[in-house]
Image: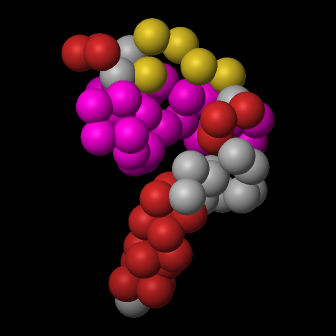
Amino acid sequence: MFKNIIAPVQAWLLSKGQCVGCGTALSKSKKTKGKNGTVKVTCKCGRIFIYDPKNKKYRRALFEEV
Ligand SMILES: [Zn+2]
């Protein structure tokens, strides 16, 4: 039930380049090289995201990418 409410909010935050947990701008977070030209972004709160420079979008890291 909660997932249905939280998911659109998370997608909205990510579309603005902000962490879904703490709202920090991911552009200021620590970045490391990811797979296939992506960038792994680690927020100060510990959440990990994947930035894809091709479509300029952030998404949550998959379990196997963490
Ligand atoms: Zn965060």
* Magenta residue span: 40-66
Is residue 18 or residue 45 the one in the foreground? 18
Which quadrant would residue 11 be assigned to in this image?
Answer: bottom left
- Where's the C terminus, which quadrant? top left
Q: Position of residue 44 (x, y in %)?
A: 76, 35
Which quadrant would residue 26 be assigned to in this image?
Answer: top right
Q: Residue at x 69, y 30 (%)?
A: 29
Query: Is 9 included in the stretch rendered in magenta?
Result: no
Specify whether 57 is left or right of 41. Answer: left
Residue 59 in sight here: yes
- Where's the N terminus, which quadrant? bottom left
Residue 61 in sight here: no
Q: Position of residue 38 (x, y in %)?
A: 35, 22
Q: Residue at x 36, y 29 (%)?
A: 53
Q: How is the image coloured?
A: secondary structure
Name above or below for residue 40 compared with residue 18.
Answer: above
